[in-house]
Image (spheres, rainbow, N blue to C red):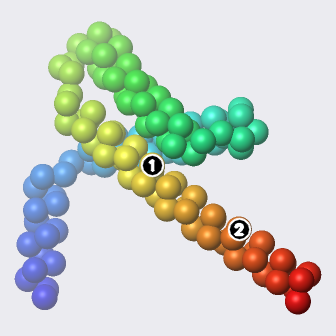
Amino acid sequence: MKRFLEKIDEWISTHIKLDDTLHYELAGIITAILYILVLNYFDYEVDFNLVSAIAFFGTVIILAAKEIVIDFHIKKLTFSTRDMIAGILGSLTTVVFMSIFKSMNIFVDMYVRETIMNNWVG
């Protein structure tokens, strides 16, 4: 088992750089912030799938703008598809977690409503 974990650690340190991790995490944070902003703007009376799409594509636009404006034009670096992929994966991870949390919340709401109705009726 120890050898297996060492192999995984070796693969991660070889293939995943700190910059990729930072892009992944920052994209997840941006997506979460966009979720909050959109939900607050519509007073939580909006389709959750629409909010997911806005948060995801908004994050992708922000990531692309950062790569084009800051990295390519200001820093004179090449456009990094690796940074974009890491950011897209971070955003997708946040969208998946938000969907899971939303589905869990629905089940909790259904349970609370059912319990209250049963107590009132019974």
Q: Is residue 110 above or below residue 72?
A: below
Q: Which amino acid does label 2 sit on?
A: Asp
Residue at 34% across / 23% down in the picture? Answer: 64
Instruction: Specify few, some or many for label 2: CA neighbours under 10 Å numbering under 14, 14-19, or 20 or more.
Output: few
Depth check: give the residue in front, 29 or 108: 108
Q: Where is residue 105 in the image (x, y as percent from the top left)?
A: 63, 65
Residue under label 2: 109
Depth check: give the residue in front, 6 or 85: 85
Q: Quadrant of the C terminus?
A: bottom right
Instruction: Specify few, some or many for label 1: CA neighbours under 10 Å numbering under 14, 14-19, or 20 or more.
Output: many
Query: Is residue 48 among what the camera can see?
Result: yes
Instruction: Pick out the residue farthest to the right.
Output: 120
Q: How far apart are marks 2 and 1 (CA)?
A: 21 Å
Q: Which of marks 2 and 1 is nearer the N terminus?
A: 1
Residue at 20% across / 36% down in the picture? Answer: 82
The reply, left or right, for residue 76 in relation to residue 99 is left
What SS does tag 1 mark? helix
